[in-house]
Amino acid sequence: MTLRLAAFAAGLACAFAALPARAGETLDLDDAFARVLRAHPDLREIDARRPLLAHERDQAAQRPSLRFDASLENAIGSGDLRALDGAELTLGLSSVLERGAKADARAALVQRRLDGLGNERAARRLDLLAETARRYLDALAASDQRRIALQDIRQREQAVSFARRRQQAGAAPASLVLTARAALAEAELGLDRASHQRALAVARLGALWGEREPSFELADNAPPGLPEIAPLARLEALLRDTPDLAGFTDQRRIAEARLQLARSQSRADIDWSFGVRRLQADDDIGLVAGISIPLGSRGRAAPAIRMAESELQRLSVERESASLSLYATLVEAHGRYRLARLEASRFEDDIIPALERAERDARLAFERGAAGPLEWTQLQDRIVEARMRQLASTVDGQRALIELQRLTGEPLLATPATNPGAAP
């Protein structure tokens, strides 16, 4: 499980293709992973339970204590018992003889809970790594939105400049300049929105390790690309060893230990005592011994046994249901990734280049007075929309990839990640 976790973290870090560290406080995904695993209290809480369960196991394994008994009878009464001549003093030892290996069953139950902490910690660690990757991705997406907004502002500034020159030449009304300025203001609003979203995403990322006022800068500029991943059949095979299902194995072992403990209760314990008694009247000493066996232990233990057996059956059904649910999630995430990869690649290779060529032609035509501003501004809007849609597809694909890696605990990239959407 440790190797799978290390591979998972390495796969996510590889997928984001961190840039070389620059001077100052920079943070890549590996750094974020290290900070979360070092500082997040959920993992420390699980580690803190380990010594508690170890002490509980030691306590459960203890045998019944040996008791010292002393009793004085027929002394300091009325009539003939006013004197101590008829007193009887008994000294002895007593305890309980446990049958059915009850101490071993108690200790085994606690040991199963102790063993289950490993998978519980592994599953929680995977969840934390995945959440860290998601928040890091949100920050990268906001950074890329700022890049797109800056490109849009540069385009709108050109439109304002051209419109003002046309107006000064008497070839365009003042409304053309006002419209271009409004489009520029809207682009600036998009930049402000992206900057706010980035600050919020960075704050959410730093909150994972308790940083109240993040001072770091991201080492990456934009979400990575979406390379080919393993086919669904291979992922289904990896799903059988997912920590989510491994947790059911631990729960089953705990339920089996409870069943064994319930069965051990069907064998009655024997209370025994042994000692000596001194008769004051005759000055004699005699041995005393006794045993006590409760009746009906098997019947009293039967409900607990049936309950433990029912719990085992419930866990089997619950595991089957969880397996189907995980497979459905796997299929959905795999399909989302493939669709997002298709959309992002089409935008990158076909749609955006064609729109950029059309925008250049429309701009030249507008500069020469051969066309009006409407077609050019519409193409500018479409370019911004296409870049945003490409970014949304990339982010959706990366989120699906993170979910796939969380489910399987394995890096799934078939080729090194590329970053076609990054700023030059």
Image: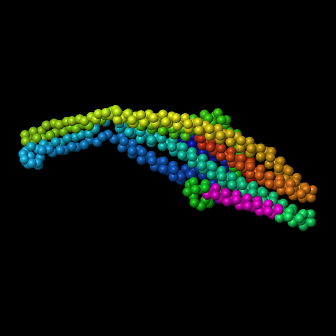
Q: Is residue 245 visible?
A: yes
Main secondary structure found in the magenta portion: helix
Classify residue 175 by image quadrant.
bottom right
- For image coordinates 81% across by 55% down, the residue present is 380
Which quadrant: the N terminus? top right
Q: Nearer the viewer, residue 386 or 226?
A: 386
Q: Nearer the viewer, residue 225 or 249?
A: 249
Classify residue 306 by image quadrant.
top left
Verify whether residue 205 appears in magenta.
no
Verify whether residue 201 appears in magenta.
yes
- For image coordinates 48% across by 47% down, the residue present is 46
Q: Identify the residue at the far bottom of this view.
A: 168
Q: Is residue 334 left or right of residue 320?
A: right
Q: Is residue 26 visible?
A: no
The magenta stretch is 179-203
Exactly how many numbered labels are in the figure? Answer: 0
Q: Is residue 319 left or right of residue 217?
A: left
Residue 348 placement (x, y as % from top left): 77, 46
Residue 161 placement (x, y as % from top left): 85, 63
- For image coordinates 61% across by 59% down, the residue present is 214
Q: How is the image coloured?
A: rainbow
Q: Nearer the viewer, residue 415 or 88?
A: 88
Classify residue 413 by image quadrant.
top right
Q: Is residue 188 left or right of residue 134?
A: right
Residue 8 placement (x, y as % from top left): 60, 43
Residue 292 placement (x, y as % from top left): 25, 36
- For image coordinates 28% across by 38% down, the residue present is 96
